[in-house]
Amino acid sequence: MTVSYDTLLARITDPDGRAIPDPATGEVVGRVRFRPVADLDAAIARARAAQPAWAARGDEERVDLLLRAADAVEAATEPLAELLSREQGKPLNGPNARFEVGACVSWLRATAATPLPGETVVDDETAHAELRYRPLGVVGAIGPWNWPMMITIWQIAPALRMGNTAVVKPSEYTPLSVLALIEVLNHVLPQDILHAVAGAGELGARLAAHPGIDKLMFTGSTRTGQAVIRSSADTVKRLTLELGGNDAGIVLPDVDPKAIAHDLFWGAFINTGQTCAAMKRLYVHDDVYDDVCTALVQVASAMPMGRGLHEANVLGPLQNRQQFDIVARLVEAARAAGATVLTGGDPDRDAPGNFYPLTLVADVDNDNPLVTEEQFGPALPIIRYHEVEQAIAMANALDVGLGASVWSEDKAAARAVAERLEAGTVWINSHGGVHPMIPFGGVKKSGYGLEFGVEGLKSVAAPQVING
Ligand code: NAD
């Protein structure tokens, strides 16, 4: 579908709705009406009514429709990326808005290309048993504001492929991006299999508690994830919880600091640090500590930050003022404790927008709040260590475990460290990259359940054994 930015925005905006501000300028991007619970209930009822016919279409037809949906999103890349950039703040270029829309297309295509056939689990003289996967019914999806389009696709594409229908509750900070994406998808998909209902936390709580939702895909903070577990308890609905993280990176002494600085930088600062599996604390061996710090400052100094719509920028504002305040508070806590701010740390509070400068903080203690709390912004604490055992212990000390990384020229040495880290994914010589065929999910208070690939399809299906 070829559609202009103005046409797309006009289809989703409501003149009487709530103003959604551009985090770079404060200008109104569009207006969204936050819907009452009755509208959510109605959407769930329609999704339930549509589900049997969607399942009955069969896998081949659903694959075809997902591929057509991918083509429709691809054709709408520019208006979608512009809206995402205006509403979320992320630049069009770099690993940002166009990249995010591109990831939606890739994940739709990869989900369409991944079958989940049944299997014979025992076939001998004692038994014959087959394990097959049926649709669950209606899948609910609640998302955050950092990668609003991509995370929505991660939640709904496998659900639809498996014959479920879906109801999405976008973040109250970025509803336009998700409504626009779903508008484009629904141009291709049959009526009522995919709904989006805008609203705040109360609507999310209702979705989690709703008896008409069979499975909830939740991506957001650990605190809200805990509320979702409680709200969903009475219905015993299945949950996938992709929650907060505080990923550690460990740099071993054998690295070439200049050679890894660029990848270290993007591992921490992708989406201006507002990424669940971004590196949020960096442990560097004493032998290379100063050189890693110098190389990182050099890379950071060359990265343009500014309004997302300006093609040269690769870093943008924080999406909302609350997040800005969290980052500012944590950097101040480090400074007050005697840490060295190598670069950044002094935002211009009178300037328009939620811009917080790229900030690197050295000589910081491992128990400083900038290290122990999830900053979710462009500020990276760099902690010195002497023994690798000490780095592993510090990395594992927190109660979250989404991702982690180990950096070394010796792959075997890196792997030996990786195997001891308490995280759902450990990258070697990179951080945070995701792939539609590689399972992704956290441990500890970063949540449970896996997304992507075959494991992702299993998570939105009801396993059934036929025994006999
Ligand atoms: P959040 O928890 O504040 O909000 C997430 C969503 O939950 C929003 O749509 C919100 O409206 C909804 N919500 C609020 N209260 C609710 C309730 N009581 N019941 C149900 N839903 C409710 O998170 P956020 O600030 O939007 O996102 C940032 C957080 O998300 C960070 O902690 C980040 O690490 C995490 N995150 C995790 C992943 C992952 O894959 N693990 C990915 C992206 C973001």
Image: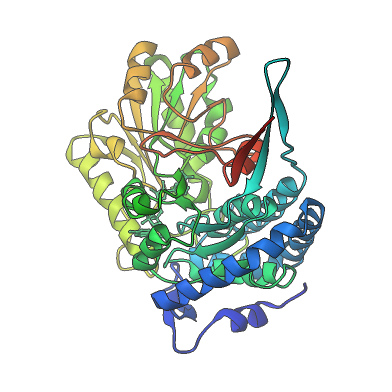
Q: State which quadrant residue 84 falls in.
A: bottom right
Q: Nearer the viewer, residue 365 or 294?
A: 365
Residue occupying image coordinates x 52% and y 55%: 147
* Image spot of residue 181 (x, y percent): 62, 67
Residue 307, visible in the rendered structure = no
* Image spot of residue 288 (x, y percent): 43, 19
Q: Is residue 304 left or right of residue 11?
A: left
Residue 301, visible in the rendered structure = yes
Q: Nearer the viewer, residue 355 or 438?
A: 438
* Image spot of residue 98 (x, y percent): 65, 58
| Ligand 1 located in image quadrant | bottom left
Rendered view: 136 above or below 336: below
Rendered view: 362 above or below 111: above
Q: How many badges with numbers are in the image?
A: 0
Residue occupying image coordinates x 43% and y 74%: 21
Rendered view: 188 above or below 368: below
Rendered view: 318 above or below 393: below
